[in-house]
Image (tube, grey):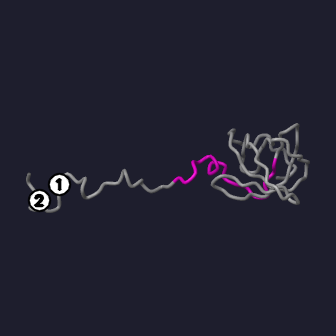
Amino acid sequence: MSSVETRNVARDSLFLFAQLTFEGRAAAERVKVRNLSAGGMMAETGGAEVSQGDRLTIELRNVGAVKGSVAWTQDDRFGVAFDTEIDPKIVRAPVGTKTETPAYLRKTALASPTPADATRIRKL
């Protein structure tokens, strides 16, 4: 994001884990995402050294890899400005959400109250 004041940008408060990889470092870090907006996020690290300006890639649920840079740091929390905007609602959605009706809720021919051919019904 630019140097324009962004405190009035809508953000979603949430708590989820994400994998973060800093450029030039081999190991990925697991971080807690505390809030998320289209242009950035606040995360909390478990002790990894983070400096303003560090380039990184973060794996966000349902979105994938997002590149960005560290905008600020304070204790074990830091802000990330994304290179491209995302839809934060997608990150909040459950993993593997489908729009299709699950098989166990679909109507089947056997569940039909009127069989197609009444003469084929076997009487007991």
Task: Give the magenta part as a residue range.
Answer: 80-97
The quadrant in which residue 73 appears is: top right
Residue 5 falls within the magenta-colored stretch: no
| Residue underneath mark 2 | 118
Percent x, y of residue 98: 50, 55
Q: CA distance from mark 2 to mark 1?
A: 8 Å
Eyeballing the image, is 37 above or below 122?
above
Cβ atoms under marks 2 and 1 closer than 8 Å:
yes
Q: Secondary structure at mark 1?
A: loop
| Type of amino acid under label 1 | Thr
- Report the number of discs: 2
Instruction: Point out which mark residue 18 bears.
Output: none
Q: Is residue 123 left or right of residue 53?
A: left
Q: Residue at x 48, y 55 (%)?
A: 99
Percent x, y of residue 8: 77, 40
Q: Residue at x 82, y 45 (%)?
A: 79
| Residue underneath mark 1 | 114
Q: Secondary structure at mark 2?
A: helix
Eyeballing the image, is 35 above or below 107?
above
